[in-house]
Amino acid sequence: MTARERVSSVDTAWLRMDRPENLMQILGIMVCSGRIDDERLKRTVAGRLLHYRRFRQIVREDTDGAWWVDDADFAIEAHVRRSLLPPPGGKHELQNFVAEMASTPLNPARPRWEFNVVETADGNSTIVIRIHHAIADGIALIGVIDSLTDDQADAPTNGGLSAAEPAERPACRQRDSDGGTGGGFWRSVIDPLADVAQASLNLGGNLWGQYLELRRDPAGLLDYASVARAVAEDIGRLALMPDDTPTRFKGKAGTVKRVAWSEPLPLAEIKAVGRALACSVNDLLLASVAGAMRSYLVNQGDAVEGVEIRAMVPVNLRQPGDREELGNRFGLVALELPLASDNPLARLHATRARMAALKSSYQAMLTFALLGAAGMAPRFVEDQILKLLTSKTTAVMTNVPGSPQARFLAGCRIEQQLAWVPQAGDIGIGVSILSYHGSVQFGLISDRNMVDDPQLIADQFGREFEKLLWLALLETPDRLADPLLVAHDVLTLSSMNRGHESA
């Protein structure tokens, strides 16, 4: 094990993005039934989380860059702590505490993560988790957190690790010598592409797209010119993309945040509606988010005619065997949310079409390359790159699959899970969609200067899904074949919606 490891350029970008008004930390909560045992929790975290070396390392910077260095003074007590909620200790007080944690920076003199245990008045315990984005992205961290949990309450603290197992997991697993592509020849091609992709703003997306395609199917990418044209078009679209329609969801950020979440929705029900309306679960949830944000603007008396805002949606770029690697391996695509229409089916169809177009683009690889370049460039160049990305965007949305079965942490059953990624620049809304144990949980984090009452949006999310559920139940194949009947149903639902919004 070396004395220090260089922080990757993409992880350096996230490290340097920290601002007092927008801290680059991933925030999560786990609501556990009953009172959790502090000592057992510490033993569990120490026995499992610390197998990932990043969680006992700090970042040191010098003239040669940023480095991961082992913390000689590491103590588990500094990272697994207990706090008290003010009375009455209910959901409102818990949300305020989570929001306060979102605005509180992690200590850079220690490894940048923390588990904070609070007890609520209903007799349950909630663990508020904060982990700096430089350590890993949300996909990797879901796996890390899942490794702390068990499928039964009485599982051993060490998770059944045998004495023969290695004492630690490396911070990043080493790749196969051939780069995973089937031969040394391709490694000689791929490695320079990866290096140049992160070092060049103009060619980064082009080379990075070729790089990933070579990794996936080295014999299949024959027409480099077509890839270059496609990436050039994506670069042009990103650079020339107009700024979002101004709304209260975007503006000058402050240091005070607000957090809210909805009641869980049954995942089986969501899947059934998706099948009935010929769309994916992701399309259905994103369209419901768009409807909830639109409803909030209408209730605030804001104009929604012609309003179209974008949400940055993370796209996982990991290979199937890379889930245990820490660090950041995702790109971003800018999804336009159709807020202008009061027709829920029109919003759903528009969302589905726009997501399909984004899936065939190189935008995710391009933004990954841009972040890599930002981490290598001087800070003023990084600021310009971030300004380009955030000026086009109003919200950040994540949709992460959790465990399909109930899990236990330190002997306590986990009832709810939520996680939020940070915002940057003038972005004022972070949306979290996380599935767990047959349910989908929707959450928001907002800047107080822009949205002081995000619970109103969170509550509306379920109502927007119910509209689509109502239509799915109503629109039988025979009925869908008659445009007049479909139009009647949509108009009826829109009328019901306007009555609710004006109430």
Image (cartoon, rainbow, N blue to C red):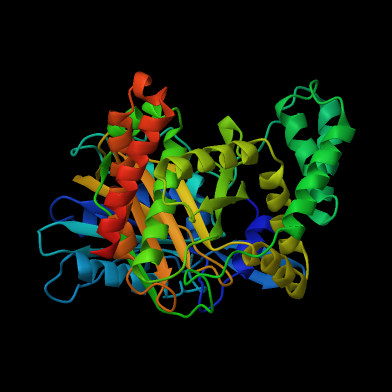
Quadrant location of residue 243? bottom right
Quadrant location of residue 245? bottom right
Residue 266: x and y in percent read 26, 37
238 left or right of 299?
Answer: right
Q: Is residue 390 above or below residue 356?
A: below
Residue visible at 83% across and 46% down in the picture: 232
For the residue pair 91 and 161, the one nearer the viewer reads as: 91
Residue visible at 75% across and 75% down in the picture: 380
138 left or right of 356?
Answer: left
For the residue pair 221 and 352, the one nearer the viewer reads as: 352
Name the residue furthest right: 225
Name the residue furthest front: 484
Residue 70: x and y in percent read 55, 61
Quadrant location of residue 61? bottom right
> Can residue 237 be spotted in the picture?
yes
407 left or right of 147?
Answer: left
Q: Is residue 95 above or below residue 203?
A: below
